[in-house]
Image (spheres, helix red, strand yellow):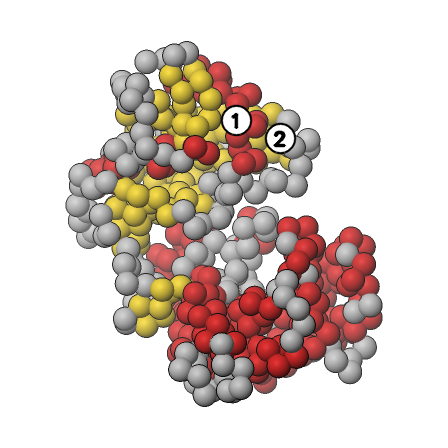
Amino acid sequence: MSDPRALVDDLTEDLKRWLPEQRWFAGKDRPVTGVRPLGVTELVDGDPQLLHVVVEVEQDDRREPYQLLVGRRTHPPEISSGSWIGAVGDLNAYEASGDLDLTGVLLDLMAREERVGALGFEHEPGAELETGLRARPITSEQSNTSLVYGGQYILKLFRKLTPGKNKDLLLHRALQGVGSKHIAPVLGSITGDLAGEPTTVGMLQQFVPDAVDGWAMATTSVRDLMAAPELHAGEVGGDFAGEAERLGRAVAEVHADLAEALGTEPADADELERSTKAMLDRLDTIAGRVPELTAHAPSLRAAFEKLRSLPADSVTMQYVHGDLHLGQVLRTVGGWLLIDFEGEPAAPVEERHALRSPLRDVAGMLRSFDYAAQQLLVGQPDEPALAERAQEWSDRNRAAFCEGYAAVAADPREQGELLRAFELDKAVYEVGYEHANRPDWLGVPLASIARITDGEG
């Protein structure tokens, strides 16, 4: 077979076209102007061939590294048409995360704790991994790629890489160390090299086959309510409030576990000023792009300015999830699990690792309840009865979540102005996202902003 580095060099023009078509590629806002290989490691040689590739993607003045698995073989595997990258010699190269015969090697290497080139494969102390399992990719993810091995393990491959230990792995190990019951156990990891620094490229966890994600459960509950709008949210068979209350408890327990494992610190005197400035800067930026937000700007500005008058010692800082919503939680027979502790994918790495108020996670979940309530109404004719039921569902489940949280920790509603500012800041971010990606959904965060700021400003 061809020299691995030369093979990837031959693919750079094809990758400029192919990368923006992948759902996990984060740079869809501008064209790819160049692709440069940073590292190529041959994991399987011969025919078939499997390469681990890290490329630097250039988009004008932005340069970001991405991880790929590239395969070549005489007899093509059964993969999606979008996985084919381009021809190299007499064979086509393809993104190999969907090649069930090749990806098993990643698990086997972790089980044996081997090193291949720049890649180190290891399992957690005491973990014994079964080898020889085939993998299947999970197709629903957006920013990463996960492979499920035999219904026992799940390997997350981080697509956009940042130097150092990944926050997801860091927090999972910390939570596991204090016996948290709301995470899936970490079993192994893959470490590469980026800019001369050891970098997490993969994390292996126990797979939970009976799990259902919170978004699916919540939206099913909303669907049940919309099918019987003459009933109230608490009267339909699919009432979600009990689960929302249990979820609130789980989130509070995870926050307590993170505080135990990694500590807390009081906010310094400038923290609220920095937060206020960041919120106002985001508001100005997005209002400049989205005219529909302009009418709400005075009320939003007033809500954010109130943070300056709050006492700094009322805010506790710690590691938090950072991107918490109903799609980041799983319901199992044993309770709720939290997943994907990376933080907001679009945020800089230093921001994702920064200590935050736990109320940011609470605000994220409250916003998610609003989205779940409204999603069936997007693009539909206005029906006041359904809109009323949707708002009732949201109010009921937001309250239940806070009640559950308050059963374990301080009631988040007691810090109303701070929680309100965090929720509004998240809604402003959503306005920018929906305007750029899903214009039909723009009304969801705008309606929430109008409701939350009613009578303010």
The reply to whether dot 2 and dot 1 touch (C-beta < 8 Å) is yes
Kindly identify which numbered label has been placed on residue 420: none
- Image quadrant where one finds the N terminus: top left
Q: Taking 131 as reference, is 217 above or below it?
A: below
Mark earlier in primary sequence (2, 1): 1
| Residue at point 67%, 72% (across, down) | 382
Residue 164 lies left or right of residue 57; in this view the side is left
Kindly identify which numbered label has been placed on residue 32: 2
Circle 2 crowding by C-alpha within 10 Å: few under 14, some 14–19, many from 20 = many
Q: What is the spatial separation of the Cα atoms under label 2 and label 1, in whole angstroms?
A: 9 Å
Residue tagged 1: 15
Q: Quadrant of residue 446?
A: bottom right
Q: Position of residue 179 (x, y in %)?
A: 30, 67
Amino acid type at circle 1 is Leu
| Residue at point 32%, 33% (across, down) | 78
Q: Taking 182 as reference, is 238 above or below it?
A: below
Residue 56 appears in the picture as rendered: no
Q: Quadrant of residue 131?
A: top left
| Residue at point 75%, 61% (across, down) | 283
Q: Taking 25 as reference, is 425 above or below it?
A: below
Q: Position of residue 319 (x, y in %)?
A: 49, 63
Q: Position of residue 219 (x, y in %)?
A: 48, 69
